[in-house]
């Protein structure tokens, strides 16, 4: 294994250059304008898999963007690791807030800046290079399969069918994913939970056209005023969500469980300072790490309507809209919460307006056990390369397909990510540390080694 580390050091520049090439293709899955670039990225990955000697390399077509499949079966009697990742990225907006263009990667302070640098091209590519390295050194100890998809950032809606239709192809013993973070570069962690998601778009419709806010203002329901009031009413004075039944299925952790999670180092003072906020703001009775992992949320992600151009236009708008996400925890169900939201939101609307609720993608919450072979292998791998036992941490984000791996393939996932929460994923100036990139490539072969034992 020392030999592998030596070679990583030697190959460093090539590893960085290859990631930069990948980052230059703008694989924004949400925006149809990038459709061809998304496919180009898939084809690029396919080319790399072929060049490194993997087998059965092909695109898996879906109703949307394709997934890329590749495998190396060294011995059918050996265990099989299925690597999942995503090559699609979030839209780069707002572009004017980037210090350098999102698809022209630059290296600054030992970090690669580009959309997708961390989420998830950089992290997925570590697996490609780690397997390449093991193949070059003739030390791949078990079988490996890759499933790298192109629709994670839009909810992986079409991947469920892919799982259902390719059960034999995707047969494996564990799923290995790097699409999460560690606590910091000296404090490794393994993500043992993800939140689920219910995402809706709402529209409040008032008068049949925009009106003069003087001539009509005062007597006509203003959809923006009303939408604001409705959203404000979704929280009580303790910042609990007021949708009836919302908390019914929420798993309450025991004091001992909460104490165990509080073992992960966290400084509230640093947190406030880093974000330049005056206080932690959320459901009463929970700490910031709890509020962002074991508690459900409701957040407006965007709100619009009326006049937002230069200067003041006196207008009483006809419509108001908002996009609202709810992060879910075990044992909430995405469909059920969407229904509860929809029923409640319609029920609280004043008679003067019409309300439409349109559900978007969703995903189920999950927890990963820490007492099985896959987790132990990841734990030992990180111990080798960080010199410390990784701390199990429940994550706040969502990766919708992970719950479906369990449901459709009966497989548990190891969320061994190497990013940092401060990598600005989904934000302007997303970046990934070269330390983290190389550390991932170094750690992954140990996972295979321990998993094969
Ligand atoms: N990689 C993230 C999820 C993540 C990030 C989990 C950090 C834990 C720590 C993933 O790409 C993501 O952004 N997922 C979306 C899902 C959605 C688009 C369906 C999310 O969480 O918003
Ligand atoms: Mn991701
Ligand atoms: Mn993401």
Image: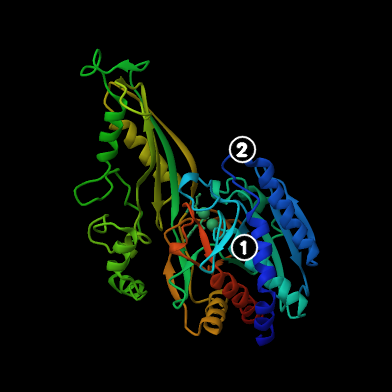
Q: Quadrant of residue 378?
A: bottom right
Determine the residue positioned at 28% across, 35% down: 228
Which numbered marker is on residue 32?
2
Q: Nearer the viewer, residue 275 or 407?
A: 275
Q: Position of residue 390 (x, y in %)?
A: 47, 78
Side (left or right) of 375 relative to 21: left
Q: Is residue 73 above or below residue 345?
A: below
Determine the residue positioned at 62% across, 61% down: 84
Q: Position of residue 62 (x, y in %)?
A: 68, 44
Figure quadrant of the C terminus? bottom right
Determine the residue positioned at 70% across, 52% down: 42
Determine the residue positioned at 77% across, 54% down: 58
Side (left or right) of 283 relative to 158: left
> Is label 2 in a helix, a strand or a loop?
helix
> Is label 1 within 8 A of ligand 2 (CB to nearest ligand atom)?
no
Q: Residues within 10 Å of mark 2 (few under 14, many from 20)?
A: few
Q: How many marks?
A: 2
Question: Which color scheme did the rendering employ for the protein?
Answer: rainbow
Residue situated furthest top in the rendering = 215
Q: Is residue 37 above or below residue 210?
A: below
Figure quadrant of the N terminus? bottom right
Residue situated furthest left in the rendering = 237
- Is there any visible trace of residue 161 in the rendered image? yes
Reading the image, the residue beneath label 1 is 124
- Is there any visible trace of residue 82 in the rendered image? no
Side (left or right) of 312 relative to 373: left
């Amino acid at each position: 294994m020392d030999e592998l580390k030596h070679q990583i050091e030697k190959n460093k520049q090539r590893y960085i250059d290859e990631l930069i090439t990948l980052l230059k293709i703008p694989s924004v899955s949400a925006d149809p304008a990038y459709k061809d670039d998304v496919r180009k990225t898939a084809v690029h990955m396919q080319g790399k898999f072929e060049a490194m000697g993997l087998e059965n390399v092909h695109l898996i077509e879906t109703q949307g963007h394709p997934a890329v499949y590749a495998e190396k079966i060294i011995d059918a009697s050996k265990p099989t690791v299925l690597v999942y990742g995503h090559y699609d990225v979030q839209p780069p907006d707002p572009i004017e807030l980037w210090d350098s263009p999102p698809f022209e990667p630059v290296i600054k302070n030992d970090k690669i800046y580009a959309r997708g640098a961390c989420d998830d091209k950089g992290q997925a590519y570590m697996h490609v290079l780690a397997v390449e390295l093991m193949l070059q050194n003739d030390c791949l100890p078990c079988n490996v399969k890759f499933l790298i998809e192109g629709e994670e950032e839009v909810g992986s809606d079409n991947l469920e069918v892919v799982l259902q239709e390719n059960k034999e192809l995707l047969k494996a013993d564990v799923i290995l994913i790097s699409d999460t973070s560690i606590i910091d570069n000296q404090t490794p962690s393994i993500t043992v939970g993800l939140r689920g998601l219910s995402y809706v778009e709402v529209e409040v419709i008032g008068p049949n056209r925009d009106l003069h806010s003087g001539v009509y203002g005062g007597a006509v329901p203003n959809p923006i005023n009303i939408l604001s009031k409705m959203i404000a009413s979704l929280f009580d004075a303790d910042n609990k969500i007021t949708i009836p039944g919302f908390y019914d299925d929420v798993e309450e952790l025991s004091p001992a469980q909460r104490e165990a999670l509080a073992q992960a180092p966290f400084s509230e003072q640093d947190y406030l300072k880093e974000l330049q906020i005056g206080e932690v703001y959320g459901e009463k009775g929970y700490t910031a790490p709890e509020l962002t992992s074991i508690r459900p949320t409701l957040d407006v992600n965007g709100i619009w309507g009326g006049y937002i151009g230069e200067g003041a236009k006196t207008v009483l708008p006809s419509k108001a809209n908002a996009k609202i996400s709810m992060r879910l925890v075990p044992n909430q169900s995405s469909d059920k919460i969407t229904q509860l939201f929809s029923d409640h939101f319609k029920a609280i609307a004043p008679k003067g307006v019409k309300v439409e609720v349109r559900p978007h993608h969703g995903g189920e919450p999950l927890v990963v056990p820490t007492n099985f072979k896959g987790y132990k292998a990841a734990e030992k791998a990180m111990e080798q390369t960080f010199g410390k036992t990784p701390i199990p941490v429940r994550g706040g984000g969502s990766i919708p397909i992970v719950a479906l791996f369990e449901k459709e393939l009966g497989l548990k996932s190891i969320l061994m990510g190497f990013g940092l929460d401060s990598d600005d994923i989904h934000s302007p100036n997303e970046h990934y540390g070269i330390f983290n990139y190389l550390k991932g490539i170094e750690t992954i072969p140990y996972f295979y080694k321990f998993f094969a034992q």
